[in-house]
Protein backbone atom coordinates (compact mmCIF):
# COMPACT_ATOMS: atom_id res chain seq x y z
CA UNK A 1 0.00 0.00 0.00
CA UNK A 2 0.94 3.68 -0.11
CA UNK A 3 1.99 3.76 3.56
CA UNK A 4 4.35 0.85 3.11
CA UNK A 5 5.90 2.35 -0.04
CA UNK A 6 6.80 5.49 1.92
CA UNK A 7 8.28 3.73 4.95
CA UNK A 8 11.94 3.07 5.63
CA UNK A 9 13.02 0.02 3.65
CA UNK A 10 16.21 -2.02 3.59
CA UNK A 11 17.42 -5.25 1.94
CA UNK A 12 18.71 -8.08 4.08
CA UNK A 13 21.28 -10.09 2.12
CA UNK A 14 21.52 -13.85 2.51
CA UNK A 15 24.63 -15.31 4.10
CA UNK A 16 25.92 -18.38 2.28
CA UNK A 17 28.01 -19.17 5.37
CA UNK A 18 26.84 -17.98 8.81
CA UNK A 19 29.00 -15.09 10.08
CA UNK A 20 31.13 -15.57 13.16
CA UNK A 21 29.59 -13.63 16.03
CA UNK A 22 32.70 -11.70 17.10
CA UNK A 23 32.02 -7.97 16.43
CA UNK A 24 34.50 -8.13 13.54
CA UNK A 25 32.65 -7.29 10.34
CA UNK A 26 35.04 -9.05 7.99
CA UNK A 27 32.17 -11.44 7.21
CA UNK A 28 30.00 -8.50 6.12
CA UNK A 29 31.96 -7.35 3.07
CA UNK A 30 29.58 -6.21 0.33
CA UNK A 31 26.60 -5.74 2.65
CA UNK A 32 25.11 -2.23 2.28
CA UNK A 33 24.92 0.00 5.35
CA UNK A 34 22.00 2.25 6.26
CA UNK A 35 22.82 5.43 8.23
CA UNK A 36 21.14 6.51 11.46
CA UNK A 37 22.31 10.09 11.58
CA UNK A 38 19.62 12.73 11.02
CA UNK A 39 17.40 14.66 13.40
CA UNK A 40 14.42 13.19 11.53
CA UNK A 41 15.58 9.81 12.93
CA UNK A 42 15.71 11.09 16.53
CA UNK A 43 13.35 11.76 19.41
CA UNK A 44 14.16 15.47 18.97
CA UNK A 45 15.90 15.56 22.34
CA UNK A 46 17.77 18.89 22.63
CA UNK A 47 20.75 17.07 24.16
CA UNK A 48 21.41 15.34 20.82
CA UNK A 49 23.62 17.85 19.06
CA UNK A 50 24.11 15.91 15.84
CA UNK A 51 26.24 13.08 14.42
CA UNK A 52 29.27 14.10 16.49
CA UNK A 53 27.19 13.32 19.60
CA UNK A 54 25.91 9.93 18.44
CA UNK A 55 25.28 8.25 15.09
CA UNK A 56 25.24 4.75 13.65
CA UNK A 57 25.08 2.62 10.54
CA UNK A 58 23.24 -0.67 10.19
CA UNK A 59 23.75 -3.82 8.13
CA UNK A 60 21.34 -6.75 8.03
CA UNK A 61 21.74 -10.33 6.78
CA UNK A 62 19.88 -13.60 7.11
CA UNK A 63 19.92 -17.35 6.64
CA UNK A 64 17.20 -19.96 7.30
CA UNK A 65 17.99 -20.00 11.03
CA UNK A 66 18.82 -16.43 12.06
CA UNK A 67 18.48 -12.76 11.29
CA UNK A 68 21.88 -11.08 11.69
CA UNK A 69 22.33 -7.39 12.50
CA UNK A 70 25.57 -5.40 12.66
CA UNK A 71 25.45 -1.88 14.07
CA UNK A 72 28.43 0.46 14.21
CA UNK A 73 27.97 3.26 16.72
CA UNK A 74 29.95 6.46 17.25
CA UNK A 75 29.27 8.08 20.63
CA UNK A 76 31.23 10.92 22.18
CA UNK A 77 30.28 9.91 25.76
CA UNK A 78 29.68 6.18 26.24
CA UNK A 79 27.70 5.18 29.33
CA UNK A 80 28.31 1.51 30.12
CA UNK A 81 27.67 0.17 33.61
CA UNK A 82 26.09 -3.20 32.70
CA UNK A 83 22.51 -1.99 33.08
CA UNK A 84 20.69 -2.48 29.75
CA UNK A 85 17.85 -0.23 30.90
CA UNK A 86 20.04 2.85 31.40
CA UNK A 87 23.19 2.19 29.33
CA UNK A 88 23.94 3.23 25.80
CA UNK A 89 22.36 0.33 23.94
CA UNK A 90 21.28 -1.00 20.58
CA UNK A 91 17.68 -2.22 20.41
CA UNK A 92 16.20 -4.36 17.63
CA UNK A 93 12.45 -4.54 16.95
CA UNK A 94 10.97 -7.32 14.81
CA UNK A 95 7.37 -7.94 13.82
CA UNK A 96 5.72 -11.31 14.37
CA UNK A 97 2.92 -10.30 11.98
CA UNK A 98 3.79 -11.58 8.51
CA UNK A 99 0.64 -10.07 6.93
CA UNK A 100 1.16 -6.57 8.40
CA UNK A 101 4.92 -6.27 9.01
CA UNK A 102 4.73 -2.62 10.09
CA UNK A 103 2.10 -3.18 12.77
CA UNK A 104 2.90 -1.76 16.20
CA UNK A 105 1.52 -4.79 18.03
CA UNK A 106 2.91 -8.33 18.13
CA UNK A 107 6.55 -7.37 17.97
CA UNK A 108 9.70 -8.67 19.60
CA UNK A 109 11.98 -5.99 21.03
CA UNK A 110 15.43 -6.95 22.32
CA UNK A 111 18.46 -4.88 23.33
CA UNK A 112 22.15 -5.18 24.10
CA UNK A 113 24.28 -2.56 25.91
CA UNK A 114 27.18 -1.08 23.98
CA UNK A 115 30.20 -2.23 25.98
CA UNK A 116 33.95 -1.84 25.75
CA UNK A 117 35.27 -3.82 28.69
CA UNK A 118 33.81 -7.32 28.42
CA UNK A 119 33.86 -8.73 24.91
CA UNK A 120 31.81 -11.89 25.26
CA UNK A 121 28.61 -13.27 23.81
CA UNK A 122 25.52 -12.44 25.82
CA UNK A 123 21.79 -12.97 25.56
CA UNK A 124 19.86 -9.93 24.45
CA UNK A 125 17.23 -8.66 26.85
CA UNK A 126 13.71 -7.33 26.51
CA UNK A 127 12.76 -4.06 28.20
CA UNK A 128 9.02 -4.61 27.88
CA UNK A 129 8.47 -5.38 31.57
CA UNK A 130 10.55 -2.49 32.87
CA UNK A 131 13.36 -4.85 33.84
CA UNK A 132 16.01 -6.71 31.89
CA UNK A 133 14.78 -10.21 31.00
CA UNK A 134 17.13 -12.45 28.94
CA UNK A 135 15.75 -13.67 25.62
CA UNK A 136 17.18 -17.07 24.69
CA UNK A 137 17.71 -17.41 20.96
CA UNK A 138 18.83 -13.79 20.68
CA UNK A 139 22.48 -13.06 21.42
CA UNK A 140 25.28 -10.69 20.55
CA UNK A 141 28.39 -8.89 21.64
CA UNK A 142 30.16 -5.60 21.12
CA UNK A 143 33.69 -4.33 20.78
CA UNK A 144 35.45 -1.03 20.09
CA UNK A 145 38.16 -0.10 17.63
CA UNK A 146 39.33 3.36 16.58
CA UNK A 147 36.38 5.04 18.28
CA UNK A 148 33.72 2.90 16.61
CA UNK A 149 31.67 0.52 18.76
CA UNK A 150 30.55 -2.51 16.77
CA UNK A 151 27.53 -4.46 17.99
CA UNK A 152 26.89 -7.78 16.21
CA UNK A 153 23.68 -9.70 16.91
CA UNK A 154 21.77 -12.73 15.78
CA UNK A 155 18.11 -13.47 16.47
CA UNK A 156 16.52 -16.87 15.86
CA UNK A 157 13.65 -16.71 13.38
CA UNK A 158 11.73 -19.07 15.66
CA UNK A 159 11.22 -16.17 18.09
CA UNK A 160 8.99 -14.33 15.63
CA UNK A 161 8.01 -16.72 12.81
CA UNK A 162 6.65 -20.24 12.57
CA UNK A 163 7.76 -20.82 8.99
CA UNK A 164 11.28 -20.81 7.59
CA UNK A 165 11.93 -17.47 5.82
CA UNK A 166 12.43 -17.44 2.07
CA UNK A 167 13.77 -15.01 -0.53
CA UNK A 168 11.29 -12.21 -1.13
CA UNK A 169 9.75 -12.34 2.33
CA UNK A 170 9.25 -9.02 4.14
CA UNK A 171 9.85 -8.46 7.83
CA UNK A 172 8.86 -5.54 10.05
CA UNK A 173 12.15 -4.23 11.46
CA UNK A 174 13.75 -1.33 13.27
CA UNK A 175 16.99 -0.40 15.03
CA UNK A 176 17.03 2.07 17.92
CA UNK A 177 20.24 3.52 19.32
CA UNK A 178 19.82 4.65 22.93
CA UNK A 179 22.24 7.43 23.80
CA UNK A 180 22.56 7.81 27.58
CA UNK A 181 24.70 10.80 28.47
CA UNK A 182 23.99 10.23 32.16
CA UNK A 183 23.34 7.25 34.42
CA UNK A 184 19.63 7.98 34.72
CA UNK A 185 18.64 6.44 31.41
CA UNK A 186 18.68 7.20 27.69
CA UNK A 187 18.50 10.93 26.99
CA UNK A 188 18.31 10.57 23.22
CA UNK A 189 16.98 7.87 20.92
CA UNK A 190 17.97 7.53 17.26
CA UNK A 191 15.73 5.30 15.16
CA UNK A 192 16.52 3.92 11.71
CA UNK A 193 12.89 3.86 10.56
CA UNK A 194 12.17 7.47 11.47
CA UNK A 195 11.29 9.74 14.40
CA UNK A 196 10.82 8.19 17.84
CA UNK A 197 8.34 9.91 20.10
CA UNK A 198 6.46 7.63 22.51
CA UNK A 199 7.20 4.22 21.06
CA UNK A 200 4.80 2.07 19.07
CA UNK A 201 5.55 3.81 15.78
CA UNK A 202 5.22 1.67 12.63
CA UNK A 203 8.27 -0.42 11.89
CA UNK A 204 10.36 -0.18 8.76
CA UNK A 205 10.49 -3.10 6.34
CA UNK A 206 13.23 -5.56 5.46
CA UNK A 207 13.08 -7.59 2.27
CA UNK A 208 15.06 -10.83 2.26
CA UNK A 209 17.17 -11.08 -0.90
CA UNK A 210 19.99 -13.30 -2.14
CA UNK A 211 22.30 -10.48 -3.15
CA UNK A 212 22.45 -6.71 -3.44
CA UNK A 213 21.75 -6.99 -7.17
CA UNK A 214 18.29 -8.37 -6.34
CA UNK A 215 17.40 -5.51 -4.00
CA UNK A 216 14.76 -3.13 -5.42
CA UNK A 217 16.16 0.10 -6.83
CA UNK A 218 13.85 2.07 -4.52
CA UNK A 219 16.03 1.46 -1.45
CA UNK A 220 17.39 4.78 -0.29
CA UNK A 221 19.88 6.07 2.22
CA UNK A 222 22.38 3.22 1.89
CA UNK A 223 26.03 4.11 2.34
CA UNK A 224 29.31 2.27 2.80
CA UNK A 225 31.00 4.83 5.05
CA UNK A 226 30.47 5.93 8.63
CA UNK A 227 28.79 9.30 8.98
CA UNK A 228 29.85 11.98 11.40
CA UNK A 229 33.06 12.39 13.34
CA UNK A 230 33.25 12.04 17.10
CA UNK A 231 33.61 15.37 18.86
Image: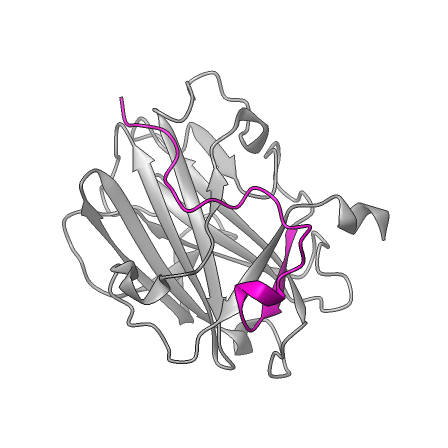
The residue drawn where x is 32% and y is 48% is 113
Residue 162, given in percent of the width and then of the height, sits at: 63, 81
State the predominant SS element of the stretch in magenta.
Answer: loop
**Quarter of the view holding residue 201:** top right
Q: How is the image coloured?
A: one colour
Residue in the picture at 37% in, 31% down? 54
Visible residue check, residue 38: yes
Name, please, the residue furthest toward the front: 213
Q: Residue sitting at 34 percent across and 30 percent down?
A: 184
Q: How many marks?
A: 0
Identify the residue at image location x=61%, y=44%: 220
Quarter of the view holding residue 27:
bottom left
Asked if residue 25 lies left or right of residue 108, the reply is left
Residue 192: image location, x then y, percent? 54, 43
Instruction: Say which quadrant the C terminus sits in.
Output: top left
Q: Residues in magenta?
A: 204-231
Question: Horizontal and vertical percent for residue 109?
Answer: 52, 56
**Magenta stretch contains residue 212:** yes
Q: In the image, residue 130 lies at what x, y percent? A: 47, 47
The answer to if 230 sits in the magenta stretch is yes
Amino acid sequence: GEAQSQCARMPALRFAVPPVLDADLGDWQGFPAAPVVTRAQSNFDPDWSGPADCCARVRVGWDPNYLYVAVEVQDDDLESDRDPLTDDAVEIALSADTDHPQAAGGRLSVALPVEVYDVRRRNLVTRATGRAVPVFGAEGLSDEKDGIHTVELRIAWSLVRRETPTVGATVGFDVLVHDADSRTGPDSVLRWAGPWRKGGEPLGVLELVRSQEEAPMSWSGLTASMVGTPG
